[in-house]
Image (spheres, coloured by chain):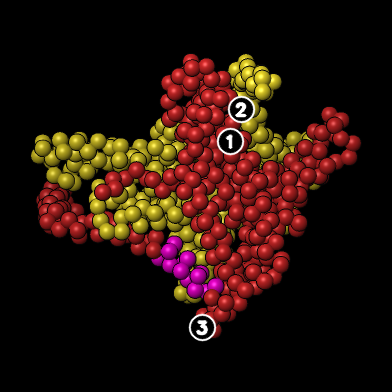
């Protein structure tokens, strides 16, 4: 292409844009449509539609075409093994979430109130979170297994005489979950604590309240929303998890996520897997709604809502 | 009653005198807890013996050479990078459109778009992963490299939207008006005013997208075909079979990757932006 023609082409392109712009300026709705359509299409096709298909498959005997049935859900509620797995999943989720939230709040509180190097500590807290999930679980396998790092350290110090072998236990699963989700809990707590007006705390102290009373009557109620967001962020992924119980829990600590995975990887009963997934989704939605009713304003993106 | 209140006063005094110390101790212990496993695997990647024992008898770089010589591991690494490099621009572009629409316009279905864009964060990964498998299965789309890319785009969008919406909201639109008043057209204004102003947010979103995609496991595990192996799925197979110390080397790869992306993100934007979205 000769360089002499380039300005001409450039002018043409600019003209084209100019034309296109005025065309769109006269048709604001078309403009909005062109902006919203591509992402909406992608979300609809690859996210919403799959969920609909899964709900549909959960009501069939097998891959379509197949007769409709309620059998997949009946199997879930009538067979004791599945109910007990759902219950165990709920218990582990509740325990891990409570522990994570308590520790996470203590960390965030100490960061905001007692530490001056907040940025650096925040970095130290989030960096492990960006390390691969499976790597972090693998690290804990090394630490917790019989004659692993923990056993070696405790034997060396002389606290124990026999290796403990904490791996493949309920405790190991809890340790793994807390480890994974602690940074995720710290972030919303940190945000809501650092938005808290220091004057309120000073006022409470000036009026004679001690640190505990001030915490209970000022800090805690005013960071309630952040706490609920943390509970949601931590509780939901734990409920659906299968990696952590698989790698750290062994056979006695089966969670519902492992059963779902099994339907697709070994048992090849997709309909039943779909019914289990829908059940998990419903439980999670219930958790989310409860959390939001309790004040966790999770979906507030801060856009203009008219 | 007075015994109770004096006990309470004692507690308050203890909290007043020792609260700071207790809090900082807790902070240090938590950071040790978060970093200890990372140090353990890094250290073990230099262990000589094949049996995983601690402490290792002697130190070596052999396992790094084994990793570099392992075609399966290297090709999984390359596949992971390819997928992340394709996913990132797609997800960021779509998220810019979503954030722009949410920030600027009122349209029917806006609140639904707002909800659906961040919904994948709160639906357990396994539920969406399984749903995608079922969808591709019923519709008849063969699992492949590209189904993994589609899944990754969905996985990433909520995070990039959560970064980009506040970026666009914070952007002072009177700058654009000033540009129009001075005679610039929409395209020039967008190029010279809007883009440079939202660029830090876009870069942060891109880094986050790349990191999430590179580490993504659950969606990938369900929608990939047998030939497409990413580094996380390769790792999973290794752990399920029998882990050689080579796994420690792969761990170090992931750790170095994580630390450097976070540091780059911090250098390019502020920490608040990549860590919080609470307003």
Question: Which of the two discs, 3 and 1, sits closer to the camera?
Answer: 1
Q: Quadrant of the N terminus of chain B?
A: top right
Q: Position of residue A272 (x, y in %)?
A: 60, 71
| Distance between the alpha carbons at the discs numbered 1 and 2 | 10 Å
Q: Which mark is residue B27?
A: 2
Name the residue carrying label 3. A65
Q: Secondary structure at mark 2?
A: helix
Vertical order, B88 against A56 (above or below): above
In the rendered structure, which segment of residues is drawn in magenta? A45-58
Q: Chain of mark 3?
A: A
Chain letter behind tag 2: B
Q: Is residue A16 visible?
A: no
Q: Is residue B276 left or right of residue A13?
A: right
Asked whether A168 or A1 is in front, the reply is A168
Report the chain holding disc 1.
A
Quarter of image, res A98: top right
- The residue labelled by disc 1 is A104
Q: From the image, state the color of chain B.
A: yellow
Q: Tell me what residue is drawn at x 63 percent, y 19 percent.
A: B9
Task: Check chain identity for marks 3 and 1: say if they share one.
Answer: yes
B211 and A215: which is toward the camera: A215
On the image, the x and y values in percent for residue A77 come to 64, 69
Is residue A206 magenta-colored?
no
At a point 16% along the width and 38% down the height, the residue shown is: B177
> Above or below — where is B52 with respect to B224?
above
From the viewer's side, name the closer residue of A54 and B36: A54
Q: Is residue B13 above or below residue A268?
A: above
Indicate the quadrant containing the C terminus of chain B: top left, top right, bottom left or bottom right: top left
Q: Which chain is red?
A: A
Between the residue at mark 3 and the residue at mark 1, the CA separation in whole angstroms equals 49 Å
């Amino acid at each position: 292409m000769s360089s002499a023609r380039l300005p001409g082409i450039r002018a043409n392109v600019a003209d084209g844009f100019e034309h296109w712009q005025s065309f769109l300026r006269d048709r604001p709705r078309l403009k909005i449509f062109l902006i919203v359509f591509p992402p909406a299409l992608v979300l609809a096709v690859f996210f919403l539609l799959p969920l609909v298909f899964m709900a549909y498959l959960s009501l069939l005997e097998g891959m379509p075409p197949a007769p409709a049935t309620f059998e997949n859900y009946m199997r879930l509620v009538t067979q004791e093994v599945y109910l007990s797995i759902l219950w165990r999943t709920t218990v582990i989720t509740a325990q891990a979430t409570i522990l994570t939230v308590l520790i996470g709040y203590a960390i965030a509180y100490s960061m905001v109130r007692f530490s001056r190097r907040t940025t650096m500590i925040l970095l130290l807290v989030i960096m492990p979170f960006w390390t691969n999930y499976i790597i972090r679980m693998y690290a804990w396998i090394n630490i917790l297994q019989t004659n692993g790092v923990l056993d070696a350290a405790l034997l060396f110090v002389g606290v124990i005489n026999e290796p403990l072998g904490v791996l493949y236990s309920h405790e190991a699963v809890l340790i793994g979950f807390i480890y994974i989700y602690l940074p995720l809990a710290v972030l919303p707590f940190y945000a809501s604590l650092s938005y808290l007006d220091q004057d309120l705390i000073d006022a409470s102290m000036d009026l004679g309240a001690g640190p505990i009373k001030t915490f209970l009557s000022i800090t805690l109620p005013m960071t309630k929303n952040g706490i609920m967001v943390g509970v949601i962020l931590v509780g939901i992924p734990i409920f659906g998890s299968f990696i952590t119980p698989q790698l750290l829990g062994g056979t006695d600590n089966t969670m519902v996520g492992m059963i779902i995975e099994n339907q697709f990887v070994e048992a090849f009963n997709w309909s039943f897997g779909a019914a289990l997934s829908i059940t998990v989704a419903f439980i999670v939605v219930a958790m989310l709604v409860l959390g939001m009713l309790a004040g966790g304003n999770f979906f507030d993106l801060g856009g203009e809502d008219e | 009653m007075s015994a109770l209140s004096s006990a309470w006063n004692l507690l308050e005094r203890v909290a007043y005198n020792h609260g700071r110390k207790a809090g900082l101790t807790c902070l240090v212990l938590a950071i040790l807890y978060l970093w200890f496993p990372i140090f353990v695997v890094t250290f073990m990647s230099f262990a000589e013996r094949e049996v995983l024992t601690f402490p290792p008898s002697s130190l070596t770089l052999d396992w790094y050479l084994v990793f570099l010589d392992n075609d399966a591991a290297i090709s999984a690494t390359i596949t992971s990078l390819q997928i992340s490099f394709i996913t990132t621009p797609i997800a960021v572009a779509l998220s810019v459109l979503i954030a722009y629409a949410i920030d600027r316009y009122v349209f029917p279905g806006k609140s639904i778009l707002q909800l659906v864009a961040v919904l994948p964060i709160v639906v357990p990964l396994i539920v969406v992963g399984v749903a995608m498998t079922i969808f591709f299965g019923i519709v008849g789309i063969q699992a492949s490299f590209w189904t993994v890319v589609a899944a990754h785009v969905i996985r990433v969008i909520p995070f990039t939207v959560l970064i980009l919406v506040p970026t666009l909201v914070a952007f002072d639109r009177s700058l654009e008006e000033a540009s129009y008043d001075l005679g610039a057209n929409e395209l020039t204004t967008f190029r010279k005013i809007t883009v440079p102003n939202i660029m830090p947010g876009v870069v942060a979103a891109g880094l986050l997208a790349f990191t999430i995609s590179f580490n993504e496991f659950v969606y990938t595990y369900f929608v990939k075909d047998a030939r497409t192996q990413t580094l996380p799925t390769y790792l999973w197979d290794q752990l399920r079979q029998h882990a050689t110390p080579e796994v420690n080397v792969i761990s170090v790869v992931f750790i170095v990757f994580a630390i450097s992306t976070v540091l780059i993100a911090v250098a390019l934007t502020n920490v608040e932006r990549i860590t919080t979205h609470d307003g």
